[in-house]
Image (spheres, rainbow, N blue to C red):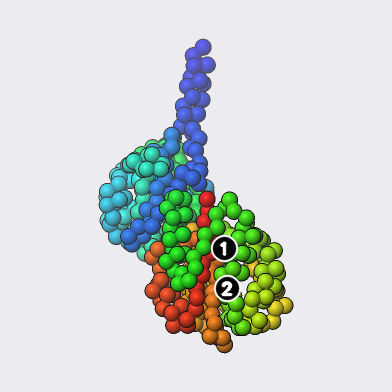
Amino acid sequence: MKKFLILFLIIFFNADFYSEIPSVPDDYIILEMANSGYDLYIKKMEGIESILLTESEKDPSLKKTNYGLRTPKFYPCNGNEIRILNGKILHTKYDLYSLIDSTIEPHPILKEAFHFFLTDTLLYGYKWTRQGEIEVKPGTRINLRLFEKKYGDYSGNFKDQWIILKLFYNKTDYNRGVIEEFKDISNAKAMVITKSEDFKKQIHDLIVNTLPIEYDLDLIFIIDCTLSMKEEMPVFKNIFPELKNDILKKIKKARIAFIFYRDYGDMFLNKIYDFTDDLTYVDYLVKNIQIDGGADIPEAIYEAIYEIKKLNFKSDNRAAFLIGDAPAHPVPRGKVSKDDAKKILEEFNVKFNTICIPVK
């Protein structure tokens, strides 16, 4: 009986000590833009009492040192957090900057969450060992070290989990924002298509009915080519031959240019195809549009508009259609601002129409 009791206690202790730590679902992670960086929120889950952000997973063989991430200087968000290593509270100057959190705070969506402030560049390691930097942006991979005890205490169980940082946007605010953005940037007609409408018919009718009857026209299509257009792009490709023919019924001499755009960090920011009246080539370009990228919601719209200055205009009649479903970045990441884009439209006298396809 005593042997059975001792065996039971050992099994019970080991089962408790090695209790499984849950993985954090994607929708339990929220990344939002903040002044000089990003706010990262991770929903509090049962079995997780602290989280340390690290540059990689812990080496199972324990032969390679694994480092936690830290900010370049002190920030109160995580700078006042306690971190325990080998049973002792760390007190070095570097540990003031460690990205560790054991303090739960209220969150409007996640209810209760761990909170980290991430600067654009995070550091790991030390100059006398191995050190490096990680650039923080949507698409960056970082490791979450999830602890069953507070303060990153390794005397309890822990688990590593890779995540990819993705910016979070409230869908209601996003819908409102993209519509307002497209209206603001337009100097001609701003049109909205909802998901409940017939996109094929609407895109055709809006473009054809908007164009005036002219002898000649330099026409530009500026098109979002990120993954959020995966439903609309095949429809646009399908309708384009009919759309092109109906445009030519109103415009005797039409020259067409394309600017395809994505976002920062994608395979390309924008691709420019100058004006041409070679309709076979135009068909080829549309048929071969490829969509990819766009890890976060906003796209590099201002940069795409700015590229209009590189086109070789011949006609005094000039029109453009921006077709997309996402707003521009609220804070430009490059040198081109909204004002710069608007000045280009004014300088080149382009009637700029927008067709917004918001997520619903």
- 160 or 38: which is nearer to us? 38
Circle 2 crowding by C-alpha within 10 Å: few under 14, some 14–19, many from 20: some
* Residue 2 position within the rendered picture, expressed as x and y whole percent measured from the top left: 49, 14
Apparent side of residue 148 relative to residue 231 in the rendered image (left or right): left
- 171 or 31: which is nearer to us? 171
- 31 or 302: which is nearer to us? 302
Q: Residue 37: name its quadrant.
A: bottom left
Apparent side of residue 30 relative to residue 248 in the rendered image (left or right): left
Q: Label 1 sits on what residue type?
A: Thr
Residue at 35 percent across and 54 percent down: it is 117
Q: Secondary structure at mark 2?
A: loop
Q: Secondary structure at mark 1?
A: loop
* Residue 355 position within the rendered picture, expressed as x and y whole percent measured from the top left: 53, 64
Q: Which residue in the structure is indicated by mark 2? A: 211
* Residue 252 position within the rendered picture, expressed as x and y whole percent measured from the top left: 66, 81
Circle 1 crowding by C-alpha within 10 Å: few under 14, some 14–19, many from 20: many
Residue at 49 percent across and 68 percent down: it is 189
The tag earlier along the polypeptide, 2 or 1, is 2
Rendered view: 6 above or below 215: above
Q: Residue 344: name its quadrant.
A: bottom left
- 179 or 155: which is nearer to us? 179
Q: Which residue in the structure is indicated by mark 1? A: 226
* Residue 17 position within the rendered picture, expressed as x and y whole percent measured from the top left: 46, 32
